[in-house]
Image: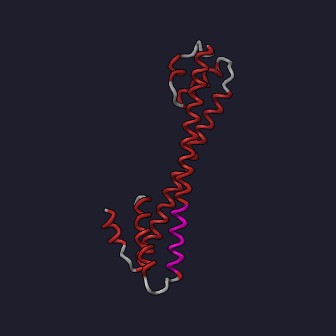
Amino acid sequence: MELWQVRREYRLVAMSLRRRKEPPDVYLEGVEEQVLSALLLCDRFHTELGVLRLAKRCALARLKRVLRWVESAGLARSIPRALTRKDDAAAAAELARALERKGRDASHLRQLLDELAHLDRRLEEARARISRMTTLSEEGLQLLLVHARVGKPAALAARTG
């Protein structure tokens, strides 16, 4: 189930729980708190994911400027021009190796490549955390539905398709 579906179903369950006449069960409040905290963590992780994507775009733009500078400065005269024309990290790594073989300093290029690799790892970690939190909130929502007697998990699956 997608995160937006979990949020929608939680809102429906929460509204029906608030309308009930009898006082809420302590266990039910704990499950509801678990679902809420997982949804809030998902929001935080989505924000982190957006920031990481922006940082990666900025690092790629810096890499592009460095590659253009290497080309225009004439540092890569004996290196194939295709390596300085490509904007991807693999071509930049090959260019850095070629510059190092020629005795040129490629530390700034290496630093940018390391930064891009680090950002890629952090992006994957953030996606994995979002996935785990979505699963956790979905499981809590299923418990909430069962124990609140608002609906059954089969009814939830039928509504979300």
**Residue drawn at point x = 60 percent, y = 33 percent:** 113
**Residue drawn at point x = 58 percent, y = 29 percent:** 63
| Up-down relation of residue 36 to residue 82 (above or below) | below
Q: Main secondary structure of the magenta part?
A: helix
Q: Which residues are magenta?
A: 27-40
Q: How many marks?
A: 0
> Residue 53 colored magenta?
no
Rendered image coloring scheme? secondary structure
Quarter occupied by the N terminus: bottom left
Task: Please identify the quarter of the rendering in which residue 68 is found.
Answer: top right
| Up-down relation of residue 48 to residue 96 (above or below) | below
Q: Nearer the viewer, residue 97 or 117?
A: 117
**Residue drawn at point x = 46 percent, y = 87 percent:** 22
Taking the image as shown, residue 9 lies to the left or right of residue 46, namely left
Quarter occupied by the C terminus: bottom left
Q: Position of residue 93 (x, y in %)?
A: 58, 28
Q: Position of residue 14 (x, y in %)?
A: 45, 73
| Up-down relation of residue 49 to residue 93 (above or below) | below
Q: Position of residue 136 (x, y in %)?
A: 49, 65
**Residue drawn at point x = 40 percent, y = 67 percent:** 9
| Up-down relation of residue 56 to residue 101 (above or below) | below
Q: Position of residue 137 (x, y in %)?
A: 48, 65
> Residue 33 colored magenta?
yes
